[in-house]
Image: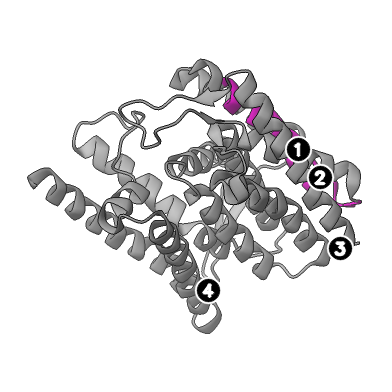
């Protein structure tokens, strides 16, 4: 069946190229301004191309787990919401309201609610009556955490690949791993366009792409956790960089009386880019940070206990936010 993945790759390539041409022809492009670092109008339909490729994969491949197919199908709808936001610049309230609809559908009607946060021998973190609101907030949180990482070429894509690679490692089921490959192939094709390799027309993920990736990975984590396929603390470690950065930057903004929803250049990738002056090194550092954090949590889980791994997850976040705050203070004093 894996030979079909080669066909899937070339179909995705054709789809991306066609979508890019259509985008430039009809003005579906991100116009540079004072807060953006790109200098040319660039198609923002990379996310749409990825989502269409993934939906087509449902027809091409026989994934027998309906829940996995359902995640991709509904993710296409949230990608459309992001595309609309790119096109018409929705308010924060409007965008969040529209995001809630497909999330609620999976939580309520398809029973994708997160039931617990893991058994830690001495206690089990059951959510009880908070199952639905906690799941809703957690998914919204992670989706928008992914959106925070979409600021320079490749950052969100490579960070997402690191998460998908970790999940590929954590759950050695052939069908699940095949499903991960279905997502990774169009994401890899997108990177060829994002960096204009072989002079391909340049594309951005756009909000559609960041929302799509955040949505898919959020519900993959819920799927693995709810079915007791992977312990929840290991799933948390797989997205540690997203959780740490999203929480820390918003807490620092609130501390400094800044609007947490306002776009800025205080994100981790912007900070690293200023210090390295290299997109390659910035992306490499972010991927390595996420992988190293996961390995710390994983080996603590395997060699000591899941409770120690949970305590360490919280402790490292405290260290992370202190370092981020100190760095932010230093920037203000320059």
Q: Which residue is mark 2?
A: 11
Residue furthest toward the front? 199
C-alpha distance separating marks 3 and 4: 30 Å
Q: Which is in the foreground here, disc 2 or disc 3?
A: 2
Q: Does the stretch in magenta take in 60?
A: no
314, 176: nearer the viewer? 176
Q: Does the stretch in magenta take in 80?
A: yes
**Element marked by disc 2:** helix
C-alpha distance separating marks 4 and 2: 37 Å
Q: Which is in the foreground here, disc 4 or disc 2?
A: 2
- Mark earlier in primary sequence (1, 4): 1
Contact check, label 2 and label 1, Cβ < 8 Å: yes
C-alpha distance separating marks 3 and 1: 20 Å
Residue interval drawn in magenta: 62-84
Chief secondary structure of the magenta portion: helix
Q: Which residue is mark 3?
A: 2
- Mark earlier in primary sequence (4, 2): 2
Q: Which residue is mark 1?
A: 15
- Mark earlier in primary sequence (3, 4): 3
Q: Which is in the foreground here, disc 3 or disc 1?
A: 1
Residue furthest toward the bottom? 303
266, 190: nearer the viewer? 190
Q: Which mark is residue 168?
A: none
Does residue 164 appear left or right of residue 4 in this picture? left
């Amino acid at each position: 069946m894996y030979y079909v993945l080669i066909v899937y790759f070339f179909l995705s390539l054709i789809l991306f190229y066609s979508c890019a041409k259509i985008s430039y022809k009809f003005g579906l492009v991100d116009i540079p301004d004072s807060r953006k670092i790109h200098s040319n109008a660039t198609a923002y339909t990379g996310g749409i191309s990825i989502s269409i490729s993934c939906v087509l994969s449902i027809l091409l491949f026989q994934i027998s787990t309906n829940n996995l197919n359902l995640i991709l199908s509904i993710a296409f709808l949230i990608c459309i919401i992001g595309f609309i936001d790119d096109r018409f610049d929705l308010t924060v309230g409007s965008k969040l309201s529209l995001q809630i609809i497909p999330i609620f559908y999976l939580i309520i009607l398809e029973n994708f609610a997160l039931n617990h946060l893991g058994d830690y021998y001495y206690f089990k973190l059951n959510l009880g009556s908070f199952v639905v609101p906690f799941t809703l907030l957690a998914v919204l949180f992670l989706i928008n955490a992914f959106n925070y990482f979409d600021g320079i070429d490749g950052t969100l894509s490579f960070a997402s690949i690191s998460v998908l690679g970790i999940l590929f490692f954590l759950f050695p089921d052939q069908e699940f791993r095949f499903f991960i490959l279905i997502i990774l192939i169009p994401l890899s094709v997108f990177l060829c366009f994002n960096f204009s390799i072989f002079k391909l027309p340049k594309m951005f993920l756009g909000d559609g792409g960041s929302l799509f990736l955040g949505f898919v990975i959020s519900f993959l984590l819920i799927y693995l956790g709810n079915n007791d396929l992977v312990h929840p603390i290991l799933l948390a470690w797989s997205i540690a960089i997203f959780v740490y950065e999203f929480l820390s930057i918003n807490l620092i903004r609130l501390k400094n009386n800044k609007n947490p929803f306002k776009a800025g250049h205080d994100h981790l990738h912007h900070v690293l880019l200023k210090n390295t002056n290299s997109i390659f090194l910035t992306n490499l550092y972010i991927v390595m940070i996420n992988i190293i954090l996961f390995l710390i949590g994983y080996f603590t889980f395997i060699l000591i206990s899941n409770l120690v791994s949970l305590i360490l997850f919280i402790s490292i976040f405290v260290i992370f936010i202190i370092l981020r705050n100190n760095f932010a203070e230093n920037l203000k004093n320059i």
